[in-house]
Amino acid sequence: MSAIAIYVEGGGSTNATKSLLRAGFSVFFREIRELARNKAIQWRIIPCGGRGETYGAFVDAVKKEPEILNILLVDSEEPVSIDASPWCHLAKRQLGGWAKPAGADDRRCHMMVACMEAWFLADPDGLTRHFSGNFDRVKLPTANLAESRTKADITDALKQATRNTKAKEYQKIRDGAKLLEKINPVEVRKHCRWCERLFVELERAIRSKA
């Protein structure tokens, strides 16, 4: 394994907005990034925009770069049991199904359950730091329920909590990348089991390199 490449859903359609998301994820994964650097493993975060584009880029990378640990990271779109196979879930969830590429087992497939914003709910202190004055954290579900909420629930909770802030609302492109830099990975891992699964797999892969 010469490198780790995470193909992540999101970032919008421009290089500028994708660059912002890349920077946000790089900060969120800083501990893992340092582990990789210490093992002389290259580290890449590749925001791909839409779901279809993300899957397509990942499949292409698996075929062309077998020496790289390519990881798919997408929204699950709905609550999912931690015992579920991510490839089985995505095959059922996506219109037409997403086939598991040869050489890409469940350890290569990871989900933000039900979406990236659940990670923000897992650390209300991070949300408060970002939105500051008049952010109403009482409107949020408790952190331990982050992965059990639907996308609609999460969207509504953020809408209600930000209503009286200067920002007025949560906007994915404007706020998402910045929030990734402000939330605490320890808190997210504690409350989001799918996030913990991703960290554990990355750590295992890095530490196993001779």
Image (cartoon, helix red, strand yellow):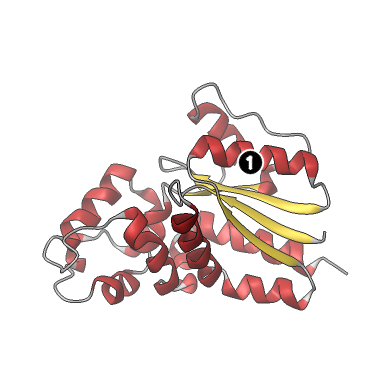
Residue shown at 65% from the left, 61% from the top: 44
Residue 88: image quadrant is: top right
Residue shown at 60% from the left, 75% from the top: 31
Residue lying furthest top in this view?
96
| Left-right relation of 148 to 54 | left
* Observer-nearest of 45 and 101: 45
Image coords of residue 118 (percent x, y): 38, 55
| Left-right relation of 175 to 207 | left
Q: Is mark 1 on a helix, strand or loop?
A: helix
* Observer-nearest of 57 and 83: 57
Residue lying furthest left in this view?
164
Residue 180's place in the image compared with 125, above or below, is above
Image coords of residue 175 (percent x, y): 33, 62
Residue 119: image quadrant is: bottom left
Image coords of residue 9 (percent x, y): 50, 47
Res. 203 visible in picture: yes
| Quadrant into which the N terminus falls | bottom right
Residue 56's place in the image compared with 38, above or below, is above
Count neighbours of disc 1 (C-alpha within 10 A) and say few if under 14, some if 14 to 19, many if 20 or more: some
| Quadrant into which the C terminus falls | bottom right
Res. 85 visible in picture: no
Q: Mark 1 points at which residue?
A: 57
| Left-right relation of 120 to 139 | right
Residue shown at 65% from the left, 29% from the top: 99
